[in-house]
Image: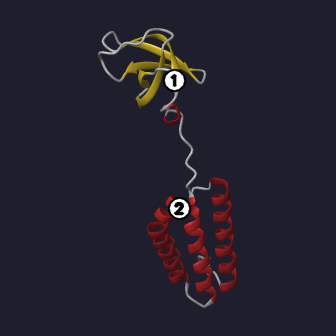
Amino acid sequence: MGTDILILSGPELNLIWLGLFIILIVIELFTVGLTTIWFAAGALAALAANALGAGLVVQIIIFLAVSCVLLIFTRPWAAKHLNRKCIRTNYEGKIGKVIRITQKVDNLEQTGASIVDGQEWSVRSKSDSETLDTGALAKVVDVSGVKLIVEKYEEEP
């Protein structure tokens, strides 16, 4: 009894590279993270190398080289230019909002709160010397950890 060595031929390798290409494209469609698309291109390049008669080692080198080169040199450009619609995260969306104070804001006493979009936030004044009474309006100018940093807001007549 001898050991059988698995030797893949051209048509079998075509199916493997094609299958890998399809799997990577499907993953990219579900994640839309611009990560597996570069490896899908590498699989396509390896498929082409196989069609031209290159050996398995050369195909693997081409797969890795094309994938890495595309990932390193084109991903930053693609991420910058293809993902222009930036959705503000929870805290970024609070900056610039006018809020009503639900607990007196006093930095020295470390008090202050407000309900913003249904969530209670700790509130601190931008200036330690400024206090804001309950019911006052304030404008969010920054977020520090889990605290909204505000300044007094005067309604325009």
Location of residue 20 (image quadrant)? bottom right
Residue 5 appears in the picture as rendered: no
Residue 138 locus on image (x, y percent): 46, 21
The quarter of the picture where the N terminus appears is bottom right
Q: Crowding near pointer 1: few (<14 within 10 Å), some, many (20+)?
A: few
Residue 134 horizontal side relative to residue 20, left or right: left
Question: Element type at marker 1?
Answer: loop
Question: Looking at the image, which is closer to me, 118 or 45?
Answer: 118
Residue 153 locus on image (x, y percent): 45, 21
Name the amino acid type tagged 2: His
Residue 93 horizontal side relative to residue 73, left or right: right
Question: Looking at the image, which is closer to me, 136 or 57?
Answer: 136
In the rendered image, which residue does mark 1 sit on?
Answer: 156
Mark 1 vs mark 2, foreground winner is 1
Residue at 51% from the left image edge and 10% from the top image edge: 135
Q: CA distance from mark 1 to mark 2?
A: 39 Å
Question: Element type at marker 2?
Answer: helix
Residue 38 appears in the picture as rendered: yes
Residues tagged 1 and 2 counted as in contact (Cβ below 8 A): no
Residue at 68% from the left image edge and 74% from the top image edge: 18
Residue extending farthest to the bottom is: 53
Residue 30 horizontal side relative to residue 41, left or right: right
Residue extending farthest to the front is: 157
Q: Crowding near pointer 2: few (<14 within 10 Å), some, many (20+)?
A: few
Q: Which mark is residue 81?
A: 2
Residue at 35% from the left image edge and 13% from the top image edge: 110
Residue 107 locus on image (x, y percent): 33, 15
Residue 123 locus on image (x, y percent): 43, 19
Compared to residue 48, the image places residue 107 above or below, namely above
Name the amino acid type tagged 1: Glu
Mark found first going from the N terminus, 1 or 2: 2
